[in-house]
Amino acid sequence: MKSKPFLMVASLILILALLAACAKTAPTTVITEAPEEPTAAATTPPQVETTAPTAEPSSTPEVNENVLPPDPQIVTITTDDNFTLTGYYYPSAQENAPVVVLMHWMAGDHNDWNEVAIWLQNRGFTNPFENPGSDPWWDPTWFPTMPAEKSYAVLTFSFRGCQPYPAGCQSVQRENWLKDAQAVMQFARALEGVDPNRIAAIGSSIGADGAADGCKLLNDEFPGTCKGALSLSPGDYLGVSYVLTIQKMGKSEPAAAAWCIAKPGEYGICETAEGAGNDAFKGFSIPDGDHGNKLLSPDLDPLPMQLILDFLDEVMK
């Protein structure tokens, strides 16, 4: 009976010994291959678009620090007979700018062009002068829009003996006004910041003839310098045949452009000039128009103010 406990103990010791041996020889799991590297897609966060949106083009001319300020500059012009004319120079926003010379009608002086000069200058400047009246040519709200890239240098002046509207010119001085027109066109070439070989003239009534005559005389001295003249109601007012002047302008190399604009009752001179042999001539009859500056009014068809822009766009290429 004493042997049973002994056997039970011996059996227990044998079982424990076997378990211990199994624990020592059990294989251990070993990782023999490194885990796969995560891909860039897995580790790199999504890219954020950083490209700035394309800027919209500007609708106004860029400021050029090399050009003169926009303020009108008072100028004095000496004629061949030593008479001193007074005028204003409106600098362009561009370097080596084309020049537009504006010649007034008999009912006024250089102030007739106050708003038109600012319009052609196109620098966002406000007319600093008091206009003599409230007629349409002093109301820029209806003027056609100037393209942002266009900016002309502008020169205005008063013919001798002429005062602000409605006083106008106190006497008729045909020969003297012809000298004035020639002197002003010559003076335009010497303005600071302009291209002396790109000049055009625009005139009304006596200034209409002055523009054509002055352009022709300038080209006689400096061939090809004056690119053209636009005349509102010409009529041989400076004692020189408008038609003959247009003919001579057509014989220059290249032909100087001549645009003639008038109401039907005054359009005959334009029709005659059309046959003068100038291939660069254009005539426009304005059905509901009037004389001179009164052609600078809204609601006309064709619109003379738009014709001014078309003229300059064509001749100042």
Image: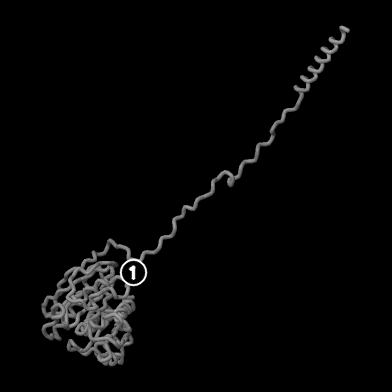
Residue 303 picture quarter: bottom left
- In the image, 74: left or right of 312? left
- Pick the residue in front: 165 or 221: 165
Please count the marks in the image.
1
**x%, y% of residue 147?**
34, 71
**Residue for point 82% across, 12% down:** 9
Say few, some or many: other residues with alpha carbon within 10 Å of mark 1 (under 14 / 14 to 19 / 20 or more): few
**x%, y% of residue 127?**
22, 69
Residue 15, placed above or below residue 299:
above
**x%, y% of residue 190?**
21, 72
Image quarter where the C terminus lies is bottom left
Residue 48 shows in this picture:
yes
Label 1's element? loop
- Pick the residue in front: 85 or 38: 38
Residue 294 picture quarter: bottom left
The residue lying furthest to the top in this view is 2
Read off the residue under disc 1. 148
- In the image, 175: left or right of 56? left
- Pick the residue in front: 22 or 310: 22
Residue 96 picture quarter: bottom left
- In the image, 283: left or right of 160? right
Please, what is the three-letter code of the amino acid marked with disc 1? Ala
**x%, y% of residue 124?**
28, 67
Image quarter where the N terminus lies is top right
**Residue for point 49% across, 53% down:** 49
Residue 77, placed above or below residue 22:
below
Residue 6, placed above or below residue 306:
above
